[in-house]
Image (spheres, rainbow, N blue to C red):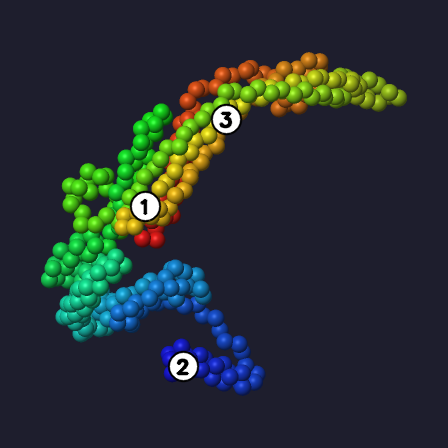
């Protein structure tokens, strides 16, 4: 019988016993102690699994799970911390005259954990896959954390990370009329420590035994249209207060009908730029990603002229009449287009390589 079924049966029996007591009070809702309510103690021996039950936020307490990978080490450290606190307090020493410590046990536990993690790392390395090398990297790191310098843990950390790392050669961007270069953005990607980008020269100098992928960003083109000017006319009417007069001994406002014609001018410059991200599997030479990145930008400016009585116009329309025609600053859309393409490329690369 699994532990989960035992717990469920005990809870049901306890609830049934409570329900049989009449009259009774409903169970209390004493909140859990946050020191313990969010801890997950890993009692597994290999094959550790992560999921909603031990990472992210706990469903009942809405607290971040704290994953305790080595429960025995955790307990010994807590006992040693209490021992040290008692030693600092004369009052506590009077109450607990002979506190216990677990320094030797902690050392033994760490040594055993280092040995187990190191051996598990070696077994993972023998499987000779990227995923197993990645698992080995974390196991060797654990071994070194438990016992710094344990066996050849440091060397194996470096070797396992090298084996686990996806090696991508970035081909140079073809010279283009805009002189756009996307390579610095590609090499700036650092979100996944198991993905590394090389220039062709760097890959030769490193004498890589295997290249996994080739990546290239092609500049498809940039086009900026000439300014397009349009205009439209609108008529406005209103009644405005011009004064007051006395009628039957009472002051009443005097209104005058006013009208105006507003001509609104709109100048628009549109631009379009595009690039393509191509990723090729080095072994099969098959394209595993070919995505076009497109940026459509525009510059818009409005001003207006009016005839008639300006009092018929709203404040926003009067503000338009105070403006004059402006000239488009050449190159501003090109810079904006490049920024948008950079952002799209950065997001696409991050989304693609997070799975590695």
Q: Tell me which numbered mark, 1 or 2, is placed earlier along the sequence.
A: 2
Between residue 203 and residue 120, name the one nearer to us.
Answer: 203
Q: Are marks 1 and 3 in contact (CB under 8 Å)?
A: no
Q: Residue beneath label 3, please?
A: 270
Determine whether, in the image, residue 102 is placed left or right of residue 253.
left
Q: Residue beneath label 2, please?
A: 6
Above or below, comparing residue 152 to residue 257 in the picture: below
Which of the image's four quarters has the N terminus? bottom left
Between residue 184 and residue 110, name the one nearer to us.
Answer: 184
Q: Residue at x 84, y 23 (%)?
A: 250
Q: Residue at x 18, y 50 (%)?
A: 209
Q: Residue beneath label 1, please?
A: 280
Q: Which secondary structure, mark 1?
A: strand
Q: Which secondary structure, mark 2?
A: helix
Residue 290 appears in the figure: yes
Q: How far is the residue under mark 1 from the one under mark 3?
A: 34 Å
Q: How many marks?
A: 3
Determine whether, in the image, residue 81 is placed left or right of residue 329.
left
Between residue 162 and residue 127, name the one nearer to us.
Answer: 127
Q: How far is the residue under mark 3 from the one under mark 2?
A: 69 Å
The residue mark sitting in front, 1 or 2, is 1
The residue mark sitting in front, 3 or 2, is 3
Between residue 42 and residue 103, name the one nearer to us.
Answer: 42
Q: For residue 90, what is the image quadrant?
A: bottom left
Q: Tell me which numbered mark, 1 or 3, is placed earlier along the sequence.
A: 3
Name the spot of residue 233 as percent of width and height, x first: 68, 20
Q: How far is the residue under mark 1 from the one under mark 2?
A: 53 Å
Above or below, comparing residue 67 to residue 222 in the picture: below
């Amino acid at each position: 019988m699994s532990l989960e079924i035992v717990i469920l049966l005990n809870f049901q029996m306890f609830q049934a016993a409570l329900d049989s007591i009449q009259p009774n009070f409903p169970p209390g809702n004493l909140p859990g102690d946050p020191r313990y309510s969010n801890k997950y103690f890993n009692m597994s021996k290999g094959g550790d699994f992560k999921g909603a039950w031990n990472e992210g936020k706990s469903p009942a307490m809405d607290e971040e799970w704290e994953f305790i990978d080595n429960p025995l080490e955790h307990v010994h450290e807590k006992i040693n911390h209490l021992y040290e606190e008692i030693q600092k307090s004369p009052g506590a020493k009077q109450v607990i005259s002979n506190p216990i410590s677990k320094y030797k046990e902690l050392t033994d536990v760490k040594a055993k954990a280092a040995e187990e993690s190191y051996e598990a790392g070696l077994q993972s390395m023998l499987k000779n896959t990227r995923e197993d090398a990645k698992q080995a990297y974390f196991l060797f790191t654990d071994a070194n954390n438990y016992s710094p310098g344990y066996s050849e843990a440091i060397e194996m950390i470096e070797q396992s990370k090298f084996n686990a790392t996806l090696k991508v050669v970035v081909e140079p961007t073809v010279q283009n009329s805009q002189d756009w270069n996307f390579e610095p953005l590609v090499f700036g990607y650092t979100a996944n420590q198991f993905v590394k980008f090389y220039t062709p020269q760097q890959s030769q100098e490193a004498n890589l035994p295997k290249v996994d992928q080739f990546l290239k960003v092609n500049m498809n083109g940039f086009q900026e249209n000439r300014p397009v000017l349009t205009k439209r006319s609108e008529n406005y009417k209103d009644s405005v207060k011009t004064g007051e007069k006395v009628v039957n001994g009472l002051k009443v406002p005097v209104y005058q009908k006013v009208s105006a014609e507003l001509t609104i001018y709109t100048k628009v410059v549109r631009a379009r730029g595009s690039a393509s991200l191509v990723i090729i599997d080095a072994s099969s030479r098959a394209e595993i990603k070919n995505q076009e990145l497109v940026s459509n930008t525009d510059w818009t400016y409005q001003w207006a002229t009016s005839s008639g009585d300006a009092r018929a116009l709203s404040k926003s329309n009067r503000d338009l009449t105070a403006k004059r025609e402006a000239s488009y600053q050449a190159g501003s859309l090109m810079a904006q287009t490049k920024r948008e393409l950079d952002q799209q490329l950065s997001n696409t690369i991050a989304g693609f390589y997070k799975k590695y």
